[in-house]
Image (cartoon, grey):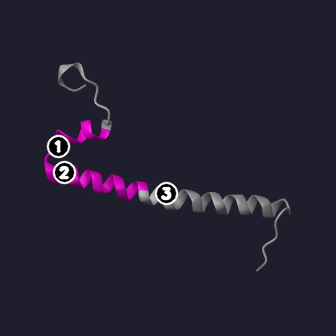
Amino acid sequence: MVGGGQRDVNTLTGLLEDLPPLAAYASAAILTESVLLVGAFVPTLTLLLSSGALRVRDIWTCPC
């Protein structure tokens, strides 16, 4: 909660506002890197698992 009974719309901003600037930037950089890593890893893993499941059931054959 922000002073005066107003609700903080962005929780991340509320958590970072009490940190020193360097720590806030470092936290934001780590969070951004984690999101980028998950954004790249999850679709690739999903594609691999899906293609493997289709291959096991002989629904899809690899052209290679």
Asked whether, in this view, residue 43 is left or right of residue 12, the answer is right
- Mark 3 crowdedness (10 Å alpha carbons): few <14, some 14-19, many ≥20: few
Q: Position of residue 57 (x, y in %)?
A: 84, 59
Q: Which residues are magenta?
A: 12-35
The secondary structure making up most of the magenta span is helix
Q: Amino acid at mark 3?
A: Gly
The numbered mark, 3 or 1, whose residue comes first in the sequence reads 1
**Residue picked out by circle 1:** 19
- Report which residue position mark 3 lands on: 39
Residue drawn 34% across and 52% down? 31
Please say if the residues under marks 2 and 3 sit with CB atoms less than 8 Å apart.
no
For numbered disc 2, what is the local secondary structure? helix
Question: Callout 1: helix, strand or loop?
Answer: loop
What is the residue that sits farthest to the bottom in this orientation?
Answer: 64
Res 49 → quadrant:
bottom right
* On screen, residue 15 above or below 43: above
> Amino acid type of disc 1?
Leu
State the residue at coordinates (15%, 50%): 21
Q: Residue at x 79, y 64 (%)?
A: 55
